[in-house]
Amino acid sequence: MFGGLVAFIRRLNQAKEPQPLSVVFWRLTGELIVSAFAGIITVLLCIYWEMPLVLIGVLAGIAGHLGGKAIDTFVLIWKSVISGGKIQ
């Protein structure tokens, strides 16, 4: 979730116009939920593939930072596995 928090803060600092605090709060909440989901999926996949614990931590942090992009990547990998290696 820290990866999602870092990504959110970076985007917030790059914003051109200020947003109301309620909007910022709900966007942060959404970002943290997506970040946590991406991190959990990453940890479970890494455990399944029997990766070292340190690598699991690194990959979960990166996936948390990527958030929805990491989930999109998981979907592409899953489609590739199902279709026999063909990426659509």
Image (spheres, grey):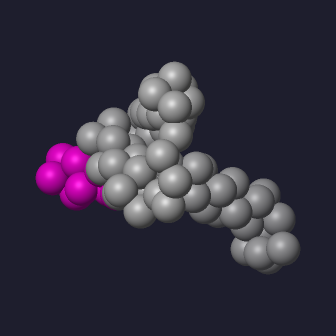
Where is residue 29? Give x, y as percent: 48, 27
Q: For the C terminus, give its image quadrant.
A: bottom right
Where is residue 9? Give x, y as percent: 34, 49
Where is residue 10? Give x, y as percent: 35, 57
**Does residue 82 appear in the picture of this structure?**
yes
* Residue 6 versus residue 40 in the image, above or below: below
Residue at x 52% of width, y 54% of height? 17
Q: Quadrant of residue 79?
A: bottom right
Residue lying at the far left in this picture: please name it.
54
Q: Which one is in front, 14 or 62? A: 14
Q: Which one is in front, 74 or 49? A: 74
* Residue 88 versus residue 70 in the image, above or below: below
* Residue 24 versus residue 83 in the image, above or below: above
- Mainly helix, strand or loop, the magenta region? helix
Q: Which one is in front, 54 or 61? A: 61
Q: For the N terminus, give its image quadrant.
A: top left
Is 70 situated left or right of 6 in this image?
right
Q: Which one is in front, 6 or 14? A: 14
Is 72 situated left or right of 35 in this image?
right
Residue at x 58% of width, y 50% of height? 68
* Residue 2 versus residue 72 in the image, above or below: above
Q: Is residue 12 magenta?
A: no
Residue at x 78% of width, y 69% of height? 84
Provide the residue span drawn in magenta: 53-62
**Does residue 29 appear in the picture of this structure?**
no
